[in-house]
């Protein structure tokens, strides 16, 4: 029920266009996946997401386990039915949230004991239990439990952590295989902090598990962005070309073509939705903070080159008014625009790969982003 096929590879980069077949539909890659942590993409209805062309969204195991609980979701027919979404879902294992949200935690070979960020109650995640929780959620793609190290750490600390995550991946696979008819597929996560040799070792160990796809994690944790690209570039040659690559937690619009050029097929990031709630819009001319006084009487759409429902109907002046007065509609309209900008941008990238024009697209994007950075006065 899970299959990945590559339709076209760019002759001058490692970019590729493909099809990812899942139990809940086929996804065109490369793909950007909106983040729906609690079973909801903030500010969006499922109908809005469908209208924008989203084929896959994310849920988070930690948050859904804490509230409302995976057994409740299982009893109500799984996450797809619970949230009325019949397209694909990827669930993170919750490892990142455990290590970032819970100050009172203890991890060892068996797993991690932590306290809820809501009420302080104690819980335990193991590689096996996170597979079982994600089985209950019924996601199409589930992630192994891993340990995400902060930045910076020593080589020895990163190596010890990476090896622990690799052993946890083996245990996750063993648990996943206990349900032969499981429609969900499992991705392990390459770790190794910012050390190319550890990234290579992690990738090689995980490739030996022969799982359907591979994620690259432990990035966007405070490191300089060029280092993020370096780690993806150091990892990619050691992953199987015939399987999808997913870089977790990236990136900004100008970065996405760069990841695609490195051979990445799947990405997710909270930037389009989080920035929307803070009044920041992504446009073809760069970032725009809609709360800026310069837009108070501006009748133009947010982006004159954008075909999203917001840009076709509303003015900058109106969007600024909504934002300044705290109207809920401000977050909704800003989110629609930002997600359209991301999803349409990915569709343009895919078309460029299929028509062998991606290298030119990449260079044009770099020039445009440089120009936008110079002209952008909104911050």
Image: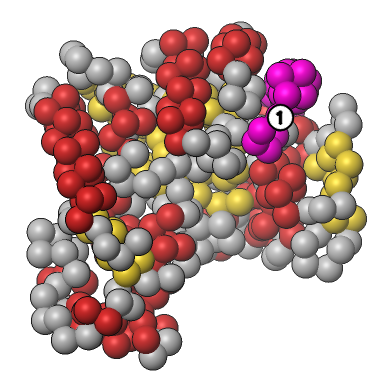
Which residue is pictured at 68% across the width and 38% down the height?
150
Q: Nearer the viewer, residue 291 or 362?
A: 291
Is any part of residue 46 visible from this angle? no
Inspect the magenta stretch and tell me whether residue 173 lies in it. yes
Inspect the magenta stretch and tell me whether residue 287 lies in it. no
Pinpoint residue 173: horizontal percent, then vertical percent. Answer: 68, 23
Q: Give the side of residue 82 with respect to residue 19, left or right.
A: right
SS of the residue under disc 1: loop
Please name the predominant secondary structure of the magenta segment in the image. Answer: helix
Pinpoint residue 154: horizontal percent, then vertical percent. Answer: 73, 24
The vertical placement of 12 against 161, above or below, is above
Pinpoint residue 137: horizontal percent, then vertical percent. Answer: 63, 50
Q: Give the side of residue 141 with respect to residue 159, left or right.
A: left
Pinpoint residue 339: horizontal percent, then vertical percent. Answer: 32, 58
Q: Give the side of residue 193 with respect to residue 312, left or right.
A: right
Which residue is pictured at 88% across the width and 31% down the height?
108
Is any part of residue 196 visible from this angle? yes
Quadrant into which the C terminus falls: bottom left
Q: Nearer the viewer, residue 86 or 115?
A: 115
Which residue is pictured at 29% across the width and 25% down the height?
261
What span is colored magenta in the figure? Answer: 148-175
The vertical placement of 252 against 271, above or below, is above
Which residue is pictured at 35% across the width and 22% down the height?
263
The vertical placement of 222 against 7, above or below, is below
Quadrant into which the N terminus falls: top left
Q: Report the residue marked by disc 1.
A: 153
């Amino acid at each position: 029920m899970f299959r990945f096929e590559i339709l076209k590879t760019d002759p001058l980069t490692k970019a590729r266009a493909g099809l990812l077949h899942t139990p809940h539909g086929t996804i065109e890659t490369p793909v950007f996946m909106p983040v729906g942590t609690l079973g909801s993409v903030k500010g969006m209805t499922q109908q809005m997401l469908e209208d924008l062309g989203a084929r896959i969204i994310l849920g988070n195991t930690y948050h859904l386990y804490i509230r409302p609980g995976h057994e409740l979701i299982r009893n109500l027919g799984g996450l797809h039915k619970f949230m009325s979404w019949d397209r694909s879902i990827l669930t993170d294992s919750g490892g990142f949230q455990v290590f970032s949200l819970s100050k009172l935690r203890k991890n060892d070979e068996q797993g991690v004991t932590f306290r809820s960020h809501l009420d302080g109650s104690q819980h335990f995640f193991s590689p096996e239990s996170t597979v079982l929780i994600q089985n209950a959620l019924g996601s199409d793609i589930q992630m192994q439990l891993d340990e995400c190290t902060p930045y910076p750490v020593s080589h020895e600390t990163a190596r010890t952590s990476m090896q622990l995550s690799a052993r946890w991946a083996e245990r996750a696979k063993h648990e996943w295989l206990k349900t032969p008819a499981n429609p969900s597929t499992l991705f392990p996560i390459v770790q190794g902090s910012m050390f190319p040799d550890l990234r290579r070792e992690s990738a090689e160990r995980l490739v030996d598990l022969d799982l359907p796809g591979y994620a690259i994690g432990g990035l966007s944790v405070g490191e300089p962005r060029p280092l993020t690209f370096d780690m993806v570039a150091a990892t990619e040659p050691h992953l199987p070309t015939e399987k999808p690559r997913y870089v977790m937690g990236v990136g900004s619009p100008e970065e996405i073509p760069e990841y695609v050029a490195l051979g990445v097929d799947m990405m997710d990031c909270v930037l389009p939705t989080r920035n929307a709630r803070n009044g920041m819009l992504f446009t073809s001319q760069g970032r725009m903070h809609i709360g800026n006084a310069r837009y108070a009487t501006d009748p133009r759409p947010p982006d004159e080159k954008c075909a999203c429902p917001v840009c076709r109907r509303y003015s900058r002046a109106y969007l600024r008014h909504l934002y300044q007065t705290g109207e809920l509609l401000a977050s909704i309209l800003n989110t629609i625009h930002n997600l359209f900008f991301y999803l349409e941008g990915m569709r343009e990238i895919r078309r460029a790969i299929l028509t062998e024009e991606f290298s030119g697209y990449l260079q044009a994007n770099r020039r445009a982003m440089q120009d936008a950075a110079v002209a952008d006065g909104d911050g």
